[in-house]
Image (cartoon, grey):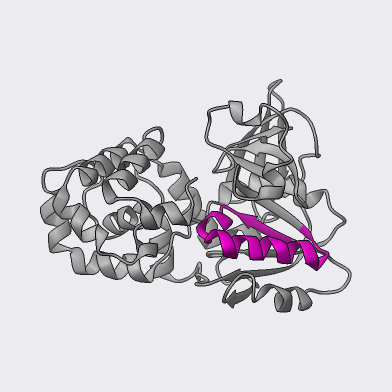
Amino acid sequence: MRSARFWETASIPELYEWFAGEAEASSPGWARVSRQVAATPAIAALLDELPPAARQPNLFLASVKRLHGPLDADPSLEDWVQRHWAAIEHLVTTRFTQTNEVGRCAVLAPVLASLPQPIALVEVGMSAGLGLFPDLYHYRWLLDDGTVVSAGSPGEVSIECQVSGESLPLAVPQVAWRAGIDRNPLDPSDPEDSAWLRALVWPGETAREERLAAALRAVADRDVLRVAGDITDALPAVLAAAPRGATVVVVHSATLAYLPREQRQRHLDLLGRLGVHWVSNEGVKVVPVVRDALPPGFTDDPRPCFVLALDGRPLARVGSHGQWLEWL
């Protein structure tokens, strides 16, 4: 996963060629669109005029999807972008990359369940807060020997995860209280917020989008403390509101890579001083204390992955959408 600095400084052709490689396996259509953007100077020129934070390929492509534009390479793409540029520019400068992947709960739930129960769960970078409800979903953990471990609440949202190795029990936490912080918290019951989150799911990932829609319906109108603000500045006050008698846990998943390096380190320094448990699920290089504790050979595996860690101690290599979990 690239850092915010790369998105802000790389040339548009370089950005979109890189993104094409990232999307190729799961969304060939987006890969072809990205290569077409990289090879079309008129589109690249428009994108290059955007504010630095708005240059992420995910933002532009989600805007295309939200506005019902071409979802694959198309000779009409340049003309379509020109005609819809005002609407695209509005979306990429007012919305954020806030993909709320509920599948990640399959790798987070066992870690949260391993702590003294019940827990007071705080998510930084909450988006619409789907990650605050690991106890609401149904899980099927598929073990290497063919065994299936099922847990959680039967319902509309079912999450499967392939598990290798042994470590923490595969279980679901008891959540007594939930709070989230985001610069732009989304409301799962708001049609526009829901539509934007669905637009962030890549074409070809229909099952993910359907599960996302189901999760948005499941958590709509449920009790969550939503705080709009800087995830570092707002955190102490949110933690102070947590109920006594619950184990306070801060979670961040695919969040810190979006922060400039200085802000990221400031947040990690604060977490180290707060005296609460924290669970990180981030790219391999995003959290230095986790990166430095990885076992030899960890990076030899070429698959894109996140590192799941508790209190800075790496526990597992995981799929970026929670689709697999390999205990260390």
Q: Nearer the viewer, residue 149 or 292?
A: 292
Counting from the top left corner in percent of width and height, residue 29 is at: 29, 39
Q: Nearer the viewer, residue 239 or 37?
A: 37
Counting from the top left corner in percent of width and height, residue 244 is at: 87, 73
Q: Is residue 162 magenta?
A: no
Does residue 251 appear left or right of residue 30 in this picture? right
Q: How many marks?
A: 0
Check the image and name the residue furthest to the top: 145
**For the magenta stretch, what is the residue range?**
250-277
Does residue 67 appear left or right of residue 147 in this picture? left
Counting from the top left corner in percent of width and height, residue 264 is at: 60, 61
Q: Main secondary structure of the magenta part?
A: helix
The quadrant where residue 126 appears: bottom right
Counting from the top left corner in percent of width and height, residue 260 is at: 52, 61
Taking the spot 68% from the left edge, 52% from the top edge, the residue there is 280
Taking the spot 43% from the left edge, 67% from the top edge, the residue there is 193
Q: Is residue 213 visible?
A: yes
